[in-house]
Amino acid sequence: MPEVSPDDFKGALGSWASGVTVVTTKLDGMVYGITVSSFASLSIDPLLITVGLADSNHLPGMIKKSKQFAVSILASDQQDISAYFARSGRDPQPEFDMPVRARVWHTGSPIIEGAIAHLDCELEHAIQGGDHTIAVGRVVGAAYDPAKQPLVYFRRAYRSVSEVSHGG
């Protein structure tokens, strides 16, 4: 069987246009979140979603302990928010730095204000998958703003929906 290079793997997966989410949790008075593109709906009955979380950061362990997380699907004008949560080397803290504005909802996990949609979840399962944890969340709150456009990530860059649809 031929070996697949990491660059070919990343290039192939980068050809999948995806929305951009921020996954957050709160544990012992500390909040933390990361930018995540590995997000999907899983089930309608019961209402379940999945997120893939790199084990190299704090979030998977915090979610396993807190048993809760929130997903904020970012709007097209929130590239700075995505960049903030994608920055490595951050630690959990009592609240997020600026420019992030967040509030809590049902579970107490922060949701990002101005996002196109939010899902508040209780942890259903945490499954190990290579160097990632796959968190399955039972949705206990969902909201969206139909007037907003999504932030899209395609071939290692932020794009507008029209750029992706026209081959951007």
Image (cartoon, rainbow, N blue to C red):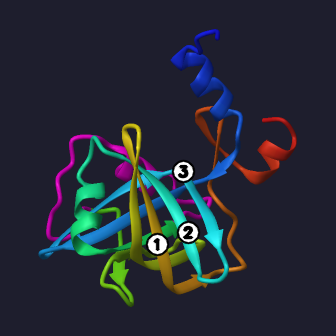
Q: Residue furthest front?
A: 1
Determine whether the residue tagged by mark 2 lies in a helix, strand or loop. strand
Type of amino acid under label 2: Ile
- Labelled pair 1, 2 in contact (Cβ < 8 Å): yes
Q: Which quadrant would the C terminus be assigned to in this image?
A: top right
**Viewed as shown, does residue 65 lie left or right of 49?**
left
Q: Residue sitting at 64 percent across and 33 percent down?
A: 14
* Label 3 sits on residue: 38
Q: Residue sitting at 60 percent across and 72 percent down?
A: 116
Residue 82: give x, y in percent of width and height: 45, 52
Q: CA distance from mark 2 to mark 3?
A: 11 Å
Q: Which mark is residue 45?
A: none
Q: Residue sitting at 87 percent across and 41 percent down?
A: 166
Residue 130: give x, y in percent of width and height: 41, 38
Based on the picture, tell me whether residue 75 belongs to the magenta stretch: yes
Nearest to the eye among marks 2 and 3: give it. 2
Task: State the extent of the magenta-drawn residues as a range.
Answer: 73-97
Work out whether residue 96 can be spotted: no
* Label 2 sits on residue: 49
The answer to which of 104 and 160 lies nearer the viewer is 104
Q: Please, is residue 20 above or below residue 167 in the view?
A: below
Based on the picture, tell me whether residue 131 belongs to the magenta stretch: no
Q: Residues within 10 Å of mark 3 (few under 14, many from 20)?
A: some
Residue 54: give x, y in percent of width and height: 37, 44
